[in-house]
Image (cartoon, grey):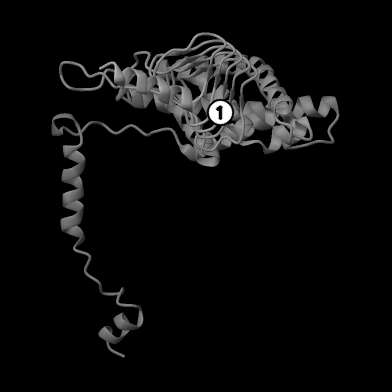
Amino acid sequence: MNSRDEEEGNGGIAGSDWNLDTIVAELRASRAGSQAGGKREQAAPLPSRKAVARIVDGLFAALFPTHFVLPDLTDEGIDYFVGQTLDAALRSLVNQVRLELQFASRQPDQSSRDQARQAIRITREFAACLPKVRALLENDILAAYQGDPAAKSVEEVRVCYPGIWAITHHRLAHQLYLLGVPLLARIIAELAHSATGIDIHPGAKIGASFFIDHGTGVVIGETAIIGRRVRLYQAVTLGAKSFPVGEDGTLIKGIPRHPIVEDDVVIYAGATILGRVTIGRGSTIGGNVWLTRSVPPGSNITQAQVRSEEFDEGAGI
């Protein structure tokens, strides 16, 4: 069998000419063009999504050891397990925080000692928040159990409900966001987004006893503020109405642009609320409502009502 026969026998792969020299050169040019001024900057490694996923698994196990890992341990055994698991997760977290700090500085070889100290400080402050985070999550779980007639037990809610999975990720991510490592926070948020279809930006402020029923398609923007005992259903969007740009034509970032939802509000499936508007305490927003204005406390907004208001406004033009 000659070389051509061997090539054809291997599906035409063995002697294929991929024109690699040209492709590699073009990829190099593309990388250079994607950086400011075409100047190559010193590379800094990013935090690892896989490592962050393992850290989150460890944090989940430390927060809820009897439900996710070892239901038969004694109290002393549980404490030992939590301590060991949390220590491993936090040691790994320090490394990922340091990588983000290096990436943000764009100078991975400079001030490494200062960055290491800062990473330890951030991780210690994060660890100190975990009891508060767990208390909030217990309120979220109870709100889901009390708010869903299909829930047979608190344990079912804890281990099965995508809304609880998403808010657990969010409460961890939000603490990291507040501590100045937004990239790590965003990675944690995207782990939940990928698993549940619920997209909560880690910057969003969410009060206690929060419940997302069903959940798929929910979007909550970075500057949204949500009060206590709020319930959302699937496909709800708390988004921005517009994106202001600066004189140079680039987006102005960090300004408040998402809704404020006060305490005891219910927002039904498919509702879209856009802009820095306020949904007053105790209000109910019906399914598929499109809302770009504030509503007072105790409002009951339906799709038909919104359409009627739009018609009246149009008639007056």
Measured along the vertical axis of the image, is residue 229 above or below residue 62?
Answer: above
Please name whichever residue, 235 or 101, is drawn nearer the observer in this view of the structure: 235
Image side of residue 66 versus residue 10, left or right: right
Q: Amino acid at mark 1?
A: Tyr
* Crowd rating for badge 1 (residues with CA inside 10 Å; few <14, some 14–19, many 20+): many
Q: Quadrant of residue 78?
A: top right
Please provide percent x and percent y for residue 156: 74, 36
Q: Nearer the viewer, residue 45 or 317?
A: 317
- Left or right relative to 158: residue 305: left
Residue hosting label 1: 268
In this rendering, is residue 168 above or below 9?
Answer: above
Q: Total of numbered circles in the picture? A: 1
x 71%, y 33%: residue: 157
| Quarter of the N terminus within the rendering | bottom left
Relative depth, front residue between 38 and 247: 247
Quarter in which the C terminus is drawn: top left
Picture coordinates of residue 192, whole percent (x, y): 53, 35
Give coordinates of residue 312: x percent, y percent. 36, 19
Q: Quadrant of residue 100?
A: top left
Residue 119 shows in the view = no
Secondary structure beneath dot 1 equals loop
Q: Is residue 266 left or right of residue 184?
A: right
Please report the residue visible at 22 percent of the width from the left and 31 percent of the height from the top. 41
Q: Is residue 206 visible?
A: yes
Q: Residue furthest left?
A: 37
Q: Give the residue at the far bottom of this rendering.
A: 1
Q: Residue at x 71, y 32 (%)?
A: 158
Q: Position of residue 276 (x, y in %)?
A: 39, 14
